Amino acid sequence: MAQDVKTAIVDAHIHYSHDAWSVYPPEEAVGILRDAGLRMAFVSSSSDDGTLKLYALAPELVVPVLRPYRSRGEISTWTGDASVIPYLEERLAAGIYVGIGEFHAFGDDVETDVMQAVIRLAREHRLFLHAHSDADAVERIFATDPDARVLWAHSGFTGVEEIRRMLSSYPNLWADLAFRSEHARNGVVDPEWRALFEEFPDRFMPGTDTFTPERWYYVREQAAWTREWLKDLPPELVENIAWRNAENLIQSAKSREN
C-alpha cells in the first residue's frame, strides 16, 4: 500500500471562465490551485482570456488548453460555426498550448468541417484533444486521425466495461475522472475500478471540472479526496494517476509525427 500521499497531483480539468473572474480574481484562483498542492493544472476557459490570466501569474503551474468557446452559449453551436477555426489558429500562434478543449462533441458532430479542422490543428500543432464526448464521437476522432491523442473528459460518463473497451481499442486514449466519485468511497477504491486502474495504469488522471464559479470551492477538497483514495493503491499506480499520466500525455502529443 502507498504511504501518506502528499504527492502533488495534476488536476486535468480546470476552467476559469468569464463568470468566475469577479468571484475569484486571478490571484485568488492561483492561490486555490497552490493550496490544493497541485503539481500542475490543465486550464481551459470560456473565453480563453481566463486561462491566460492564470498562466501569466503562474506559468509553472498552469498548463494552457485552448477551448473553442468564446462564451458559454457556444457549447451547443460551435461545431457549426466556421469562425471558430481562425480564432483557434490565431490563439495557437502563441505556442503555449498543450491541447484543444475541453469541447463538447457527440456522434456525427465529429464529421462537421469545424471538428475536422480541429483534429487537423491538433495534429499540426502536436496537441491533445480534450473531448467531452460519447464513445461514438471518440471513435470518429480516431477514424479521422488514428494517431490522435485524446483525453476523454469524465471518462465519457460511462461504465467500467465501456471504458475498458475504449481503452483497449485505442492506445492513445486517456481518461480523466472529473465529476466522478463512484470509483472510491471512504478512501477505498471500488473493486471494478481498481481492476480497471491496474489494467490501464498509464491512462487515468484526476480532475475537478470548475464549470461554474461555485465549483472552485471544491478544488482543494477534490485534491484531498483524491489523495485519500490513492492511498488504497500500490505506490507506482499512485504516482501514475496522481501526475505521471498527465505529464506523459503532454509529452506523447508533443512527440508525435505529423
Image: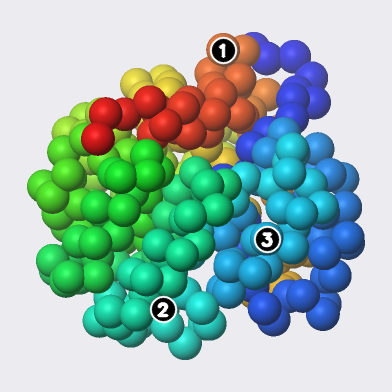
Tag 3 residue: 52
Tell me if residue 61 comes above or below residue 121 in the rendering: above
**Three-letter code, disc 2:** Ile
**Three-letter code, disc 1:** Glu
Q: Residues within 10 Å of mark 3 (few under 14, many from 20)?
A: many
Report helix, strand or loop for mark 3: helix
Q: Which residue is located at x 56 percent, y 73 percent?
A: 46
Q: CA distance from mark 3 to mark 2?
A: 20 Å
Q: Which quarter of the rendered picture does the N terminus lie within?
A: top right
Q: Nearer the viewer, mark 1 or mark 3?
A: 3
Mark number for residue 85? none
Q: Nearer the viewer, residue 173 or 69?
A: 69
Q: Which residue is located at x 45 percent, y 48 percent?
A: 99
Tag 1 residue: 236
**Three-letter code, disc 3:** Leu
In this figure, which colouring scheme has been used for the structure? rainbow
Q: CA distance from mark 1 to mark 2?
A: 38 Å
For residue 135, side relative to residue 191 (left or right)? left
Tag 2 residue: 75
Residue 89 occupies which quadrant of the picture? bottom left
Residue 77 occupies which quadrant of the picture? bottom left
Q: Residues within 10 Å of mark 2 (few under 14, many from 20)?
A: some
Q: Nearer the viewer, residue 190 or 249?
A: 249
